[in-house]
């Protein structure tokens, strides 16, 4: 089974000038982010263009650019020259007051968010969104980590229900106009009890966007909530992201490192689709000729006119 991980659609306008007359030319480039793991769940960082076969709606596409985004060892999640914008969506509802090995869920979530924050570069942007029954943008989009860290540490649990789906949609709205790679990091136990939006509504909007969800589920540390697990897993999968459900503090450490590795170990594939942009849904399939690999990529896009 193939798992999607990350497609962004860019429309690049180009201007052509001839005899003083300006002509606008639109070049439609579909850019697909891809990652691969082997049978031991290790990220593969040495794929070559000739090993990749990419199809759109069943038709093989010519890959016009192939970039290995695997970085040298360092403390950066993004690739050179492309800004990363991250919305940290933190659950502060009543259920996050439960304790795990002497720590509350909210404290574990804060710790996870701070570790990811430490990976961002000076030019990257972040925003903090806290939610219970409603979502609030605690800090505006900023490249300054200090106020973000202060506000994050001051967040406390409130006696409210959980509107997880509403919060994810709220974050999508805050990021949709940003350029470059956009990520929503959801830290929650996934137990939605108060959202106005339906699951299929949020899911369809997420699939149509160029935003990736990375979900950090705390429910697995204390319970076996199937519903909460499914919501976070499906949101991540639909957007081409990852969902993590640690069952111990030692597993939490390993999963945080895997998340960092996954964000660094990607490839960027670009192609011009053979059909006009007509607003339809286009399915993307990627196959690797190297046997035994599992690929993650976004499963499709809406061909915006």
Image (cartoon, grey):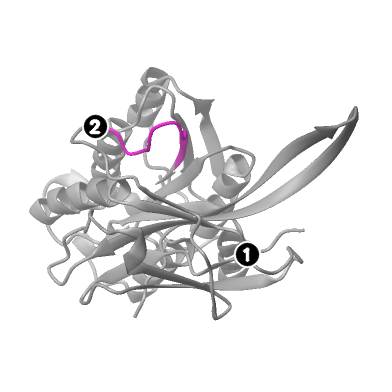
Left or right placement of residue 208 versus residue 154 in this view: right
Residue 75 disc label:
2
In which quadrant is the N terminus drawn?
bottom left
Q: Nearer the viewer, residue 73 or 50?
A: 50
Label 2, label 1: how far apart the Cα atoms are: 35 Å
Judged by depth in the image, the label closer to the viewer, 2 or 1, is 1
**Residue 32 image offset from top left, x and y in percent:** 48, 57
Give the residue furthest to the left: 250
Report if residue 291 lies within the magenta region.
no
**To which quarter of the image does residue 42 belong?**
bottom left
**Marks 2 and 1 close (CB-CB < 8 Å):** no
The mark total stands at 2
**To which quarter of the image does residue 224 belong?**
bottom left
**Residue 107 image offset from top left, x and y in percent:** 25, 40
User: Which residue matches tag 1?
Assistant: 273
Give the residue furthest to the front: 19
Q: Residue at x 59, y 56 (%)?
A: 209
**Residue 87 image offset from top left, x and y in percent:** 47, 40
For the residue carrying disc 1, how many other residues have a C-alpha within 10 Å: few (<14), some (14-19), or many (20+)? Answer: some
Q: Please tell me whether the stretch drawn in magenta is mainly helix, strand or loop.
A: loop
Residue 12 disc label:
none
Q: Secondary structure at mark 1?
A: loop
Specify whether residue 162 is in view: no
Specify whether residue 263 is in view: yes
Q: Nearer the viewer, residue 297 or 23?
A: 23
Q: What is the magenta range?
A: 76-87
Q: Nearer the viewer, residue 29 or 18?
A: 18
In which quadrant is the C terminus drawn?
bottom right
Please determine whether, in this image, residue 118 is positioned above or below residue 25: above
Q: Residue at x 56, y 69 (%)?
A: 199
For the residue carrying disc 2, how many other residues have a C-alpha within 10 Å: few (<14), some (14-19), or many (20+)? Answer: some
């Amino acid at each position: 089974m193939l798992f999607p991980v990350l497609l962004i659609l860019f429309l690049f306008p180009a201007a052509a000038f001839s005899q003083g007359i300006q002509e606008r030319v639109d070049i439609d480039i579909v850019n697909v982010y891809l990652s691969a793991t082997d049978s031991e769940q290790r990220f593969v960082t040495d794929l070559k263009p000739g090993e990749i076969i990419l199809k759109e709606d069943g038709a093989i596409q010519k890959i016009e650019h192939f970039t290995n985004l695997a970085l040298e060892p360092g403390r950066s999640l993004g690739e050179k020259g492309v800004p990363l914008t991250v919305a940290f969506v933190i659950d502060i509802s009543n259920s996050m007051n439960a304790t795990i090995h002497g720590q509350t869920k909210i404290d574990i979530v804060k710790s996870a968010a701070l570790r990811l924050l430490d990976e961002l570069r000076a030019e990257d942007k972040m925003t903090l969104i806290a939610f219970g029954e409603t979502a609030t943008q605690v800090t505006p989009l900023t490249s300054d980590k200090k106020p973000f860290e202060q506000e994050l540490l001051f967040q406390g649990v409130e006696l409210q229900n959980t509107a997880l789906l509403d919060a994810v949609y709220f974050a999508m709205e805050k990021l949709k106009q940003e350029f470059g790679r956009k990520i929503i990091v959801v830290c929650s136990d996934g137990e939605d009890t108060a959202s106005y939006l339906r699951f299929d509504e949020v899911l369809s909007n997420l699939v149509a966007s160029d935003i990736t969800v990375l979900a950090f589920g705390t429910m697995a540390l204390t319970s076996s909530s199937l519903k909460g697990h499914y919501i976070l897993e499906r949101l991540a999968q639909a957007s081409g992201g990852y969902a993590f459900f640690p069952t111990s503090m030692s597993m939490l450490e390993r999963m945080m490192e895997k998340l960092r590795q996954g964000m660094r170990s990607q490839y960027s594939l670009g192609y011009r689709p053979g059909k006009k942009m007509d607003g339809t849904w286009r399915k993307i399939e990627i196959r690797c000729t190297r046997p035994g690999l599992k690929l993650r990529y976004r499963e499709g896009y809406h061909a915006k006119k």
